[in-house]
Amino acid sequence: MSDLPGEFALIARHFRPLAAPEALGLGDDAAFLAPPPGRELVLSADAMVEGVHFLPADPPDLVARKLLRVNLSDLAAKGAAPLGYLLTVAAPRATPDGWFAAFATGLAADQARYRIGLYGGDTTSTPGPITLSLTILGTIEAGKAVHRTGARAGYGIWVSGTIGDAALGLAALQGRLDDPDGTLAARYRLPEPRLGLVRADLVAACLDVSDGLVQDLGHLCRAGLVGAEIEAALVPRSPAARAAGPAWLATCLTGGDDYEVLMAVAPEHEPALAGASTTVPLTRIGRFVAGPATVRVRDETGAAMPLDHGGWSHF
C-alpha cells in the first residue's frame, strides 16, 4: 500500500504519467519552461463545470478531451502551436477512482495526438459539482499572432467546418432532438480544434466559435469597430444539422460549443484562403460593413432574420 496521503496517491496514479519533462514528475511546486528561440508564449484558460459545460452522464475520458480541446481551440484562433498545459480538478470526495482513471486516459490519448504534456496544477475536493480548469500554453513566431482587432469594412467573413452541430448535439442528449447515429452528440462531446489553419498572412482577425456564431461575430465587430452581415443560407451545416429541419436554424446560428474558427479576410487574400485547407472546409458567409458594431443575419429573401439572442452567456 502506498504511504502517500490520498490526494497525492491519486496524483501519482493518474496524473504523474501525463507529466511533461518540464514538470519534474509533478514532484515540485512549479514547472520550468523556456520557449523556443524566436517564439512568444501564448496562454489561455477555460473552465468546465458539470451540468453547465458537460452532462453528468458524459464519459470521463471525453470530458477530459473536450476540456483540453476547447483550450487548444483558443490557440488555433491565434495561429499558435501547443506546448503543454496546467490542470486543476475539483471533485466530490465520493468520486470513484475509476472516474479519475478514465479522465486521465482521455488526457493521455489527446496528449499523444497533439504532442503535448502536463506541466502541473492542483487537485481539491468540492461538495460538487465537478469543476475543471485548464490553462494551455503555446508558442508562435514573434509578431505573427492573429488578434480580434483586424476586421475592416469590405473584408469577408469566413468560418471553418460546420456550424450548429454541438448545440443540436446537446439538444439530442437532452432528448429534445433525434440523433439516430450519434453524429450530433459526438460533436458536442468532442470538438476538433483547428490547429494550423489560421495564418497571419491570410487572416486579419479571428476567434473561435464557443458561445454562438452571431455572438462571437459581434466580438470581432466591436474589436474592429465595424458591422457585419451574414447570409443564413451560406452558413455551413452538416447533413445531420440540415436534417433537423428549419426550426433548428436559429439554434445553429446562436448555439455554442462549435469551436470552429471565425475569420476576417481581406478581399485580396480570399482566393488563397479558399485553397489553404485540404481537410477542413472553409466557407465565406458574409462581409464586414461600415457602421455600428452589430451583426445582421439575412434570410434567403434578403430580409433580416429575427433572433431571440445572439449566443450563450454565463451571466
Image (cartoon, helix red, strand yellow):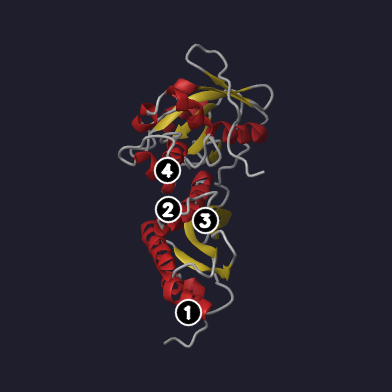
Q: Dividing the picture into quarters, in which one does residue 254 lie?
A: top right
Where's the C terminus, which quadrant?
top right
Q: Earlier in the sequence, mark 1 or mark 3?
A: 1
Looking at the rendered image, the disc whose residue lies closer to the viewer, 3 or 2, is 2
Residue for badge 3:
139
Residue 208 bears which disc, if any?
Answer: none
Where's the N terminus, which quadrant?
bottom left
Q: Position of residue 43 (x, y in %)?
A: 58, 56
* Real-space Cα separation, disc 1 to disc 3, in angstroms: 33 Å
Q: Earlier in the sequence, mark 2 or mark 4?
A: 2
* Crowdedness near tag 1: few (<14), some (14–19) or many (≥20) residues, C-alpha within 10 Å: some
Against 31, residue 287 (above or below) is above
Residue 173 bears which disc, if any?
Answer: 4
Q: Earlier in the sequence, mark 4 or mark 3?
A: 3
For this orientation, the residue located farthest to the top is 301
Name the residue rendered at 47%, 54% in the picture. 56
Q: State whether residue 196 appears in this view.
A: no
Q: Position of residue 277 (x, y in %)?
A: 37, 37
Against 308, residue 29 (above or below) is below
Q: Earlier in the sequence, mark 2 or mark 1?
A: 1
Looking at the rendered image, the disc whose residue lies closer to the viewer, 1 or 4, is 4
- Residue type at mark 1 is Ala
For this orientation, the residue located farthest to the left is 181
Q: Nearer the viewer, residue 221 or 240?
A: 240
- Residue type at mark 4 is Leu
Residue for badge 2:
58
Residue for badge 1:
9
* Real-space Cα separation, disc 3 to disc 2, in angstroms: 31 Å
Q: Secondary structure at mark 3?
A: strand
Q: Secondary structure at mark 2?
A: loop
- Residue type at mark 2 is Asp
